[in-house]
Amino acid sequence: MTNIASIDLSQYVGAQIGTVTLVKLLGKGAMGAVFIGYQSTLKRQVAVKILPKSLASSARAQQMFRDEAETVGILTHPNIVPVYEMGESSEFFFQVMQLVVGHDLRTIIGKARKHPVPTKRILPLSETIPYICQMLDALGYAHEEGVFHQDIKPANILIDDRFKRPLVADFGIARTIWAEYSSTPALFGTPLYMSPEQAALATIDGRTDIYSAGVMLMEMTAGYLPTRKEQPGDAIERKKKEPGTFFTAKPSEINPSLSSDLEAIILKAIAVHPDNRFADCLEFKTALEAYVRNNGFNEPVC
């Protein structure tokens, strides 16, 4: 079976896509890659996501790639990475997007964990809460437009170096309330962050993204996620059949300095049943804003 590892991606450096020239490989995932490109007409750098056609032999894979670009194309929000153009060449499908100069949140969290001072191995709340609040703004807007991301995780949140602004990226498995890929359900997403209903292939709504955001908040405030060491398939089965046992400790059991008020917000966001979570992103953000007001922050962080 062809996979991304078997493809020489360097062959695409210098390739011309309309007015854009591929300059440098930025990163790759299971099925595709992102390059830095140069757009000659506007004299700017852009990000170009490509999906080699050898990896997209199925109509479903091709449609998902197109749908991602079309989905993001209708979303205009300062915390969502915009897509400028989409199309295909003889060798691959592509999307031209804004190039975010910065790092993904997974990298930032990982760097903090390596800090030589133990008390600095967790991002300060003055950084964490603004990141989550702005992410919730973006997700709330997407939900109002009928789009559910379904793969919210630190690797899909890009932090702009200059303004420290988080941008939600990778709507590759987003679902809309008006479209489905086929009548046969298929599981996509990241087991650690996906909601129990997503793991069970049940009907989802915006609360599946709220769950994922809550898991992120737990990871960022506790320091790490307390889970069993198990294979992804086993993790999905646990999320589906025994979701209450997926996390093996409460956030405060990992980080004793975590306040009970913030822990209560986290636990509500990651409640097993959607009805026990925040009803929407605005309610989640409002709870964080109340926490900030009630805990003497020197500056507004939401």
Image (tube, rainbow, N blue to C red):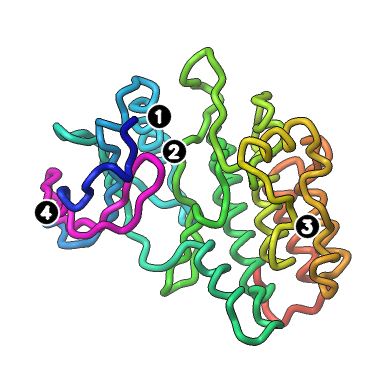
Check disc 4 and report the residue beneath it: 14
Query: Is residue 18 covered in magenta?
Result: yes
Q: Amino acid at mark 1?
A: Met
Q: Residues within 10 Å of mark 2 (few under 14, many from 20)?
A: many
- Would you name the residue on which mark 2 appears? 172
Kindly report the distance in space between the C-alpha atoms of the residues bearing marks 1 and 2.
7 Å
The amino acid pointed to by label 4 is Gly
Q: Earlier in the sequence, mark 2 or mark 3?
A: 2
Q: Secondary structure at mark 4?
A: loop
Q: Which residues are magenta?
A: 13-39
List x then y, in percent, for residue 146. Answer: 55, 32
Disc 3 marks which residue? 287
The secondary structure that dominates the magenta segment is strand
Task: Compute the Cα span from label 1 to label 4.
Answer: 26 Å
Crowd band around label 3 with a 10 angstrom C-alpha radius: few (<14), some (14–19), many (20+) = some
Furthest-top residue in this view: 183
Q: Are marks 1 and 2 in contact (CB under 8 Å)?
A: yes
| C-alpha distance separating marks 2 and 3 | 29 Å
